């Protein structure tokens, strides 16, 4: 999910700086004596990764920033140490495939001691654990490379593989790990076999995969380890507080700049898989609508006919270099769709690289016809990809700067001219953006009043208001949301709901109710400028609805809840570890628009529930969602070829049924380029239009 940044004013930065120095402690004032860390690894000295002297400064800076300036005011103590330790083990060996139970027993001495080491600027325990991991991983890869050459491709036996590492215990013997890896390797071979690869190609692909993996492990340097470990610490405070090393910070700043070339997607590394973190509005990936957040990229090819390069196990920066390229060139990706089993056959996605400009993000509009009770209504639909603004033009005082609210206002005027009788604001998959734009967009539908409340680390509450009395549209309004509508999307939809200005239709939203600000660590090192120490995105505030409740974890619950395919234990803010709790503050003073009443909502809900029971397509959608949930709950997969084919066919059948019913994109051009594109059925939008059409009829009485 997108990590939305709200850039805080100078006083907040100054407060952080003052608080940092006020809370700083010299390391030698801490009373607890700690044993010197001795590395357990038997790796040759040239392969051992060691902490650098500069990381002493950064560790002290980070711990002081977190202790004194994080929104929660949590102190670094034994509980935080336990959380950081657990997260670090998971980040290195989430599948329990490298460490032995005896390793974990030895590491457990750090379980409640990491806080004490960190407060002294000491990170050696993290490197001790990492070097054992490196030793185990390199040794395992050497075994695998030999096994790949000789292991028979026999998929006739009835055996299964548990794909969820959390359900496995740490192996007690090397023989136990050998058996687990035999199944892992057999599964990888079976996947390639089902992908129509020949035996020689299967062995060649896997050999190349693990040679690359060995190379990537050997390339992990001291700063890489520091970043992994520090993010286990920061994310023990909350999921959105993140440390960026100097190189990662530069890459992050580049991705946030006004333009760059690529496919328009930000990537992250999940275990050994390069994964789509965010689709950027306006880019090839966004327009193609074939990639989604959470998709895993397993291979990359260049041009129409280039050979695929397997990138499982690659370093993230190496994978990014392979995916990037000159604008106008094609890149082909093989992906495993989000939520699918790793055994799912990859699908191909073709994209032409472009120069991505954030100012090219824009809303889209269209008019749909919807019949209710024998009467046909014209409904305008405005798709909002993100809450964007050209800050440079805005700050320069340009009159016609580009932004979500300005583009929406223009779209509303055009839809009015087309005679629409109601408008749907479609915020599905909108991860947020500018807080200013969330306020200004709300202002298009209300006269004046508060939009959101923000509470900082000191407990002070600031109310952000819309002061413009002009209302761009005062007619029937619906807002569509889903599980990937977050942050600024939640501010807007919550305000519309609290003012009773419009009806909210869709799924429960993501639930991100926190605010981050970037802090350059170099500002705390005397005499040093520039991004020499990286930066931290620090959670400093929390936002609240005008009714005093919080969207944190809870999200915005729709008035009309459409079938939700997401498992909230796996998706959304509440699924993250160390997520901040939802709470309440005092209610802001505001005047209801009153266009939505409880009675109207109840009427609309009953009508929808009737359709849910009687409409064939809706019943099919509900059933397909339920079937997919049951399939996903089974984390064991068969290593028998016949049974695996049946599992895949069943899953793909259910996935296709669901996709055909809920799809909101356009179908690819048909074989003949002269034929027009035909829009797929979007059952969710259709239901939102039905709800709005009924609302139009009710309000017309």
Image: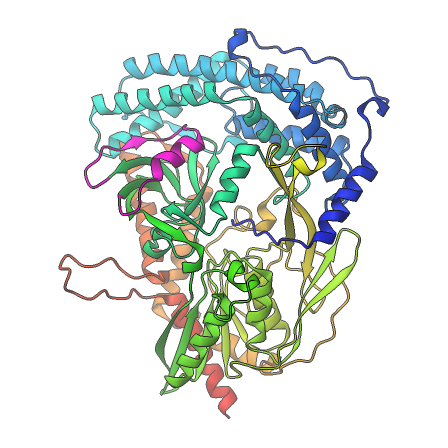
Residue 492 visible, this orientation: yes
How many labels sit on residues?
A: 0
Residue 487 placement: quadrant: bottom right
In this rendering, the answer to whether 300 lies above or below 101 is: below
Q: Inspect the magenta stretch and tell me whether residue 289 lies in it.
A: no
| Magenta part, dominant SS | loop
Residue 458 image point, x, y percent? 80, 52
Please indicate whether residue 534 sits to the left or right of residue 309 in the image: right
Identified at 22% across, 23% down, the residue is: 199
Q: Inspect the magenta stretch and tell me whether residue 321 lies in it.
A: yes
| Residue at the outermost bottom position | 701
Identified at 23% across, 40% down, the residue is: 303
Residue 655 image point, x, y percent? 35, 51
Q: Nearer the viewer, residue 667 or 452?
A: 452
Residue 75 image point, x, y percent? 78, 37
Q: Nearer the viewer, residue 508 or 521?
A: 521
Residue 551 placement: quadrant: bottom right
Range of residues picked out in magenta? 303-329
In this rendering, the answer to whether 634 lies above or below 49 is: below
Identified at 45% across, 15% down, the residue is: 138
Q: Nearer the viewer, residue 218 or 559?
A: 218
Task: Indicate the colouring scheme.
Answer: rainbow
Residue 71 visible, this orientation: no
Residue 46 image point, x, y percent? 51, 9
């Amino acid at each position: 999910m997108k990590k939305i940044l709200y850039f805080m004013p100078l006083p907040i930065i100054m407060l952080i700086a003052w608080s940092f120095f006020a809370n700083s402690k010299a390391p030698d004032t801490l009373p607890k004596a700690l044993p010197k860390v001795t590395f357990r690894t038997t790796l040759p000295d040239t392969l051992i990764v060691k902490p650098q002297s500069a990381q002493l400064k950064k560790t002290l800076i980070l711990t002081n920033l977190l202790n004194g300036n994080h929104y929660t005011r949590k102190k670094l103590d034994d509980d935080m140490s336990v959380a950081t330790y657990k997260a670090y083990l998971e980040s290195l060996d989430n599948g329990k495939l490298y460490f032995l139970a005896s390793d974990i027993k030895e590491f457990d001495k750090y379980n409640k001691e990491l806080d004490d080491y960190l407060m002294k600027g000491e990170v050696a325990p993290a490197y001790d654990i990492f070097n054992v991991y490196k030793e185990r991983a390199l040794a395992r890869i050497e075994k695998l490379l030999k096994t790949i050459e000789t292991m028979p491709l026999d998929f006739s036996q009835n055996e299964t593989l548990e794909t969820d590492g959390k359900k496995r215990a740490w192996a007690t013997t090397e023989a136990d790990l050998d058996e687990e890896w035999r199944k892992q390797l057999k599964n990888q071979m079976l996947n390639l076999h089902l992908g129509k690869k020949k035996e020689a190609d299967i062995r060649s692909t896997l050999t190349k995969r693990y040679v690359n993996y060995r190379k990537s492990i050997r390339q992990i340097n001291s700063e890489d380890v520091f970043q992994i470990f520090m993010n286990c610490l920061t994310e023990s405070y909350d999921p959105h507080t993140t440390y960026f090393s100097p190189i990662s910070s530069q890459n992050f700043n580049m991705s946030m700049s006004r333009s760059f070339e690529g496919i328009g997607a930000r990537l992250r590394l999940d275990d050994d898989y390069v994964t789509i973190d965010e689709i950027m509005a306006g880019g090839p990936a966004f327009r193609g609508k074939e990639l989604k957040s959470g998709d895993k990229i397993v291979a990359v090819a260049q041009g129409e006919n280039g050979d695929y390069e397997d990138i499982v196990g690659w370093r993230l920066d190496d994978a990014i270099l392979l995916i990037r390229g000159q604008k106008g060139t094609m890149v082909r990706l093989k992906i495993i769709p989000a939520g699918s089993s790793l055994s799912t056959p990859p699908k191909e996605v073709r994209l032409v690289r472009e120069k991505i400009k954030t100012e090219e993000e824009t809303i889209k509009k269209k008019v749909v016809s919807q019949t209710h009770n024998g009467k046909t209504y014209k409904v305008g639909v405005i798709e909002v990809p993100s809450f964007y603004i050209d800050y440079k033009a805005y700050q320069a005082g340009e009159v016609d700067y580009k932004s979500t609210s300005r583009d929406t206002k223009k779209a509303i005027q055009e839809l009015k001219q087309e005679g629409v009788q109601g408008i749907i604001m479609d915020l599905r998959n909108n991860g947020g953006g500018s807080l200013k734009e969330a306020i200004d967009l709300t202002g298009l539908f209300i006269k004046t009043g508060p939009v959101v409340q923000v509470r900082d680390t000191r407990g002070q509450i600031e109310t952000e208001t819309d002061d413009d009395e002009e209302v761009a549209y005062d007619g029937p309004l619906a807002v569509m949301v889903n599980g990937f509508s977050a942050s600024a999307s939640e501010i807007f939809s919550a305000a519309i709901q609290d003012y009773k200005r419009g009806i909210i239709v869709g799924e429960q939203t993501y639930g991100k109710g926190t605010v981050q600000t970037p802090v350059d660590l170099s500002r705390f090192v005397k005499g040093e400028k520039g991004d020499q120490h990286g930066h931290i995105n620090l959670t400093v505030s929390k936002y609240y609805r005008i009714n005093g409740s919080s969207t944190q974890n809870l999200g915005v619950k729709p008035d009309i809840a459409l079938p939700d395919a997401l498992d909230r234990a796996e998706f959304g803010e509440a699924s993250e570890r160390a997520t901040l709790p939802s709470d309440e503050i005092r209610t802001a003073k505001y005047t209801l628009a009153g266009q939505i009443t409880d009675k109207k909502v109840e009427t609309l809900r009953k009508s929808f529930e009737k359709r849910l029971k009687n409409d064939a397509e809706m019943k099919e959608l509900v059933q397909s969602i339920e079937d997919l949930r049951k399939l996903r709950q089974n984390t064991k997969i068969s290593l028998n070829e016949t049974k695996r084919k049946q599992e895949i066919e069943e899953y793909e059948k259910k996935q296709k049924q669901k996709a055909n019913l809920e799809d909101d994109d356009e179908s690819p051009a048909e074989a003949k380029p002269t034929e027009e594109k035909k829009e797929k059925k979007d059952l969710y939008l259709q239901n939102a239009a039905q709800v709005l059409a009924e609302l139009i009829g009710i309000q017309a009485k």
